[in-house]
Image: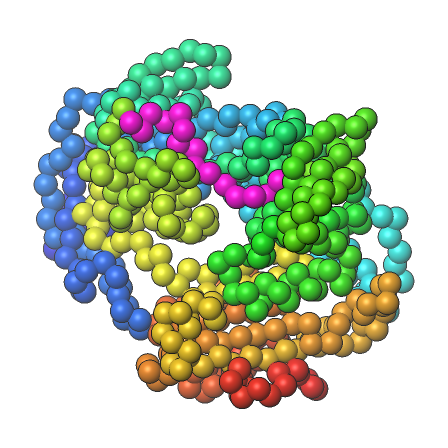
Amino acid sequence: MLFRLLKEARPIHAVISRLRNNKNSSQFENRIEWNFKIGNKGSRARSGEAVVEPIVESVVETMSHSYDYDLIVIGGGSGGLAASKEASILGAKVACLDFVTPSPQGSTWGLGGTCVNVGCIPKKLMHQASVLGESFTDAKEFGWKISSEGHDWEKMVQSVQDYIGSLNWGYRTALREKNVTYINAKGKFVDPHTILCTKKNGKTETITTDKVIIAVGGRPKYLGVEGDTECCVSSDDIFSLPTKPGKTLCVGASYISLETAGFLTGIGCEVAVMARSVFLRGFDQDISDKIVSHMERHGTRFIRKAVPKKFEKVGDKVKVTFTNQEFGFDVEEEFDTVMLAVGREACTKDLGLEEAGLTYNPSSGKIEAPDEQTNVPHIYAIGDVLEQRQELTPVAIKAGVLLARRLYAGGVLKMDYNGVPTTVFTPLEYGCVGLSEEEAIAEHGEENVEVYVSMLKPLEWMIVKEEHEGVMHREDNSCYVKLITLLSENERVIGLHYLGPNAGEITQGYAVALKCGATKAQFDSTVGIHPTVSEEFTGLTITRRSGKDAAKKGC
């Protein structure tokens, strides 16, 4: 059966599936390694060049060793789970270790990592709660006779946590179904092939493995000033607080800080954001300025060029002493809740990297691993633990799957970390893919870069005329699109940025276009869907260098 499938050049997953389902297939039971031939050389296609699905070329016996496992994955987040399941599907004997050290405030969670438990999932759901609150005003203009009795924080948290709990259970079930051994224990290297597993009750065991994937992710940083761990929460805690945060200070200029401030403002909390420097570092600063300006006009207070000096409990409040860096004086203010969002660090401190012979960045704890392979050849790393890589769930998942295929299916495709789309879920959502305007100019020179811009207001907002404290609920030209092209390459689009509703849904599709090497002319020749905000990208005419007004008039 095996060789008939090979002769037919079936795709790898079809071959494996057929062999798995064939009880007489001794070849699969003896565990095999797959080698492929593919239609293009190398691991990364050029822009516009399709990547061909690998097909089986030959089968050889492999994985003859005396270790307990073929692969141990340390970390049960999105990347670790994806790599574990894929490796097991491909015939490897796999164990996945996962353990959550409680936050300073005592928060813990189940299997699934940051994204599911204390990141993307609860953040998006609570952002949606804020969006729904904004829609009450819209609904009235569309004829709905409704009123709100305010927001029920406890109900929202319960609903969100119930959903997360169902995901935790689903992940455990998926590991079992894929024959992955799940070990709820903290892993630490004893030597390059031996892992010490410490369970919650303190019991330990050692297991050995041929290969290791480190997928431990990261946790929020603390400032290291007086009272920070005792008085402050982080993103590890905010989504499961038992009571409404009340007057809240978000410390940090990161997207986590701004997203949290945005949805808390939207559900009726008094919120301030404190930052010492630029907001959304690494993102397009033109867009960043617009996000902060919009949030400020719509109720979020910003404390700029300031750093916390001390936190202390005063009854049920937190008194914050912070320094104004511009003028050098100290200020005190009390808050109900203080959330720190000042960066993240890799969870490698107690991983025993030295015992395994691994090199890493001692300041960040992150590991340098080109193509996910560390300086120890049989040890790999994926996800947020990697140096100079995006801390994004889909990146970790794709890298984990591709790595497993290279290790156990003869795959050659490698993770392409370029052109990764993302969205910041601030009140005005921000989606982007490719280079920022600053990066494009720095990389290619201002004379070689053309930047197209347009401001607009979605049709759905046009009839909403209500004001909140003197500010239009739905402002004219508050949404913004930007297309960055490279003049020397026939105006190939190298950056796309969108500020407005449904940013993630809009940006995802354009990411495919950029991956294919789309040019400005191809955008222009595409017929837009009317009336949508996305159609704006198909008819951009105003450039940055022209100096013309980019405000949109009419529909």
Image: magenta residue range: 340-354
Q: Give me the residue at 66% from left, 82% from top.
A: 551
- In the image, 385: left or right of 305? left
List x then y, in percent, for residue 119. 56, 43
Q: Give me the residue at 16% from left, 62% from top.
A: 41
Q: Quadrant of the C terminus?
A: bottom right
- In the image, 523: left or right of 139? left
List x then y, in percent, for residue 50. 28, 68
List x then y, in percent, for residue 7. 12, 55
Q: Give me the residue at 27% from left, 33% from top.
A: 358
Classified by dominant secondary structure, the portion drawn in magenta counts as: loop
Residue 345 on the magenta span? yes
Residue sitting nearer the eye, 298 or 398: 298
Residue sitting nearer the eye, 373 or 329: 329
The reply to whether residue 83 is in sight is no
List x then y, in percent, for residue 289. 62, 65
Residue sitting nearer the eye, 366 or 332: 332
Q: Quadrant of residue 2?
A: top left
Residue 104 on the magenta span? no
How is colour applied across the structure in the image?
rainbow
The reply to whether residue 411 is in sight is yes
Q: How many marks?
A: 0
Q: Give me the residue at 49% from left, 32% from top.
A: 111
Q: Quadrant of the N terminus?
A: top left
Please, which residue is most extreme toward the front here? 328
Q: Please, is residue 114 above or below residue 276 in the view?
A: above
- In the image, 41: left or right of 94? left
